[in-house]
Amino acid sequence: MKVITICGSLKFQKEMMIVAEKLVLEGNCVLTPVYPILENLEKTEEQLEKLKEAHFKRIELSDSVYVINKDNYIGKSTKSEIEYAKKLGKEIIYLER
């Protein structure tokens, strides 16, 4: 069983969940970002940093990362996650080439 962390822009939440479900049904353990549920909840810089640290920890725990790059879009945060995963020698899988 591979451990796979999903990375990508949160605007692709639906696509992330579709991919996550498919990967789990194939027998993988999937780690996903935390999705904002409360739209009006303001987050402090410290809280945003904790969310980032938690996601980077998911990458550390993973065998690979799966990048949701719909329409080949990769934002600044996702780029840094990819670079971190590469530095750790993780396999990088892309939704679109």
Image (cartoon, grey):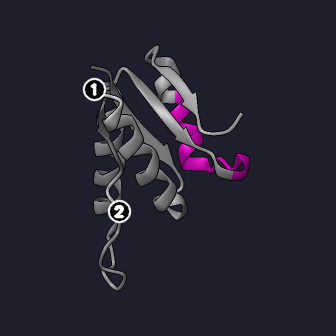
In the image, residue 53 lies in the stretch drawn in magenta: no
Q: 10 Å neighbourhood of mark 1: few (<14), some, or many (≥20)?
A: some
Q: Which residue carries the number 1 mark?
A: 61
The x, y position of residue 68, in whole percent, is 56, 45
Q: Quadrant of residue 55?
A: top left
Q: Is residue 37 above or below residue 32?
A: below
Q: Is residue 75 left or right of residue 63?
A: right
Distance between the alpha carbons at the discs numbered 1 and 2: 19 Å
Name the residue: 36% across, 51% down: 33
Residue 72 disc label: none
**Which portion, as a residue range, is magenta?**
71-83
In the image, residue 82 lies in the stretch drawn in magenta: yes
Dominant secondary structure of the residues highlighted in magenta in the image: helix
Residue 35 disc label: 2
The x, y position of residue 66, in whole percent, is 49, 34
Task: Kindly identify the amino acid type of the residue bearing the numbered disc 2.
Answer: Tyr
Quadrant assignment for the C terminus: top right
The x, y position of residue 64, in whole percent, is 42, 24
Task: Kindly identify the amino acid type of the residue bearing the numbered disc 1.
Answer: Leu
